[in-house]
């Protein structure tokens, strides 16, 4: 019986003085990302393997209702009927959805191109199934839009923050429960949603606040009648 041979490629690299394997930042980052993907897959599998017959139908309907932000747009329409402040909140929420949707679908998904989970391999029960999207998995567009809407509306209309935040969280989880997203996709979508709401609110504030030059012109224009009258009296 001969001893197994060891090639140069299989040989262990020497350890540096600190006793840790050499490799550099790129190899470390690759290892960390691999570990995060493993945790992500394990969480997805745990959700898939947990029987929840009472929740399955409810979360499936919620996930489907959140397609194209139908729930958020319905809430925005109701807010628009409630007065000046709720109307401002509705406009802020719709603007945040626009930013989040564009960022997730036109930027995030095209850059990362993560494949959707293998729902059959994970044995996700058919009672949870919604149509599997053909787009990339990362980030979750449903979550990004729901969180963006909840955040923007909650800033303008604080009493709505908690219920809309709970609804956005439920929408995000429903995408994992139905098997169309990994938990990491949903977490990234939530972060993107908060950033999108901040961007939309900042843009709205900038548009509502006139610049110093505009304010000076408006002040001058308002003073013109008084200047004209004063000049006429002096003549």
Image (tube, helix red, strand yellow):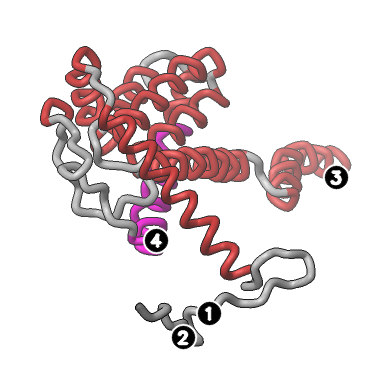
Q: In this rendering, which labeled residue sits more in front, label 3 or label 2?
A: 2
Disc 3 and disc 2: Cα gap in Å?
Answer: 105 Å
Q: Mark 4 points at which residue?
A: 112
Task: Return the mark for residue 7.
Answer: 2
Give the quadrant of residue 113: bottom left
- Which one is earlier in the sequence, the residue at label 3 or at label 2? 2
Tell me what residue is drawn at x 46 percent, y 27 percent. 150
Q: Classify the position of the C terminus by image quarter.
A: top right
Q: Is residue 75 above or below residue 112?
A: above
Asked whether 96 falls inside the magenta stretch, the response is yes
Query: x and y percent of residue 107 in the render?
Result: 40, 59
Q: What stretch is highlighted in magenta?
A: 92-113
Q: Nearer the viewer, residue 137 or 165?
A: 137
Query: Residue 219 vs residue 82: left or right?
Result: right
Count of labels in the image: 4
Tell me what residue is drawn at x 53 percent, y 60 percent. 31
- Which one is earlier in the sequence, the residue at label 3 or at label 4? 4
Q: Which residue lies most toward the left here? A: 126
Q: What element carries label 4?
A: helix
Q: Mark 3 points at which residue?
A: 235
Q: Residues at badges 3 and 4 in contact (C-beta under 8 Å)?
A: no
Q: In this rendering, which labeled residue sits more in front, label 4 or label 2?
A: 2
């Amino acid at each position: 019986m001969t001893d197994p041979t060891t090639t140069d490629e299989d040989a262990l690299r020497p350890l540096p003085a600190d006793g840790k394997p050499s490799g550099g930042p790129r190899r470390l980052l690759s290892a960390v990302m691999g570990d995060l993907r493993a945790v992500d897959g394990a969480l997805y599998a745990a959700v898939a393997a947990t029987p929840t017959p009472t929740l399955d139908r409810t979360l499936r309907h919620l996930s489907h209702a959140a397609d194209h932000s139908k729930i958020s747009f319905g809430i925005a329409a109701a807010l628009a009927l409630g007065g000046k402040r709720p109307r401002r909140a509705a406009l802020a929420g719709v603007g945040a959805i626009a930013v989040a949707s564009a960022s997730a679908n036109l930027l995030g998904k095209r850059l990362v191109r993560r494949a959707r989970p293998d729902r059959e391999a994970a044995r996700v029960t058919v009672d949870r199934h919604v149509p599997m999207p053909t787009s990339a998995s990362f980030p979750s567009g449903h979550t990004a839009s729901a969180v963006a809407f909840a955040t923007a509306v909650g800033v303008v209309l604080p009493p709505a923050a908690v219920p809309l935040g709970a609804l956005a969280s439920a929408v995000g989880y429903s995408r994992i429960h139905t098997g169309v997203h990994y938990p990491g996709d949903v977490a990234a979508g939530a972060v993107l949603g908060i950033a999108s709401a901040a961007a939309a609110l900042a843009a709205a504030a900038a548009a509502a606040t006139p610049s110093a030059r505009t304010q000076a012109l408006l002040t001058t224009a308002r003073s013109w009648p008084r200047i004209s009258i004063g000049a006429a009296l002096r003549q």
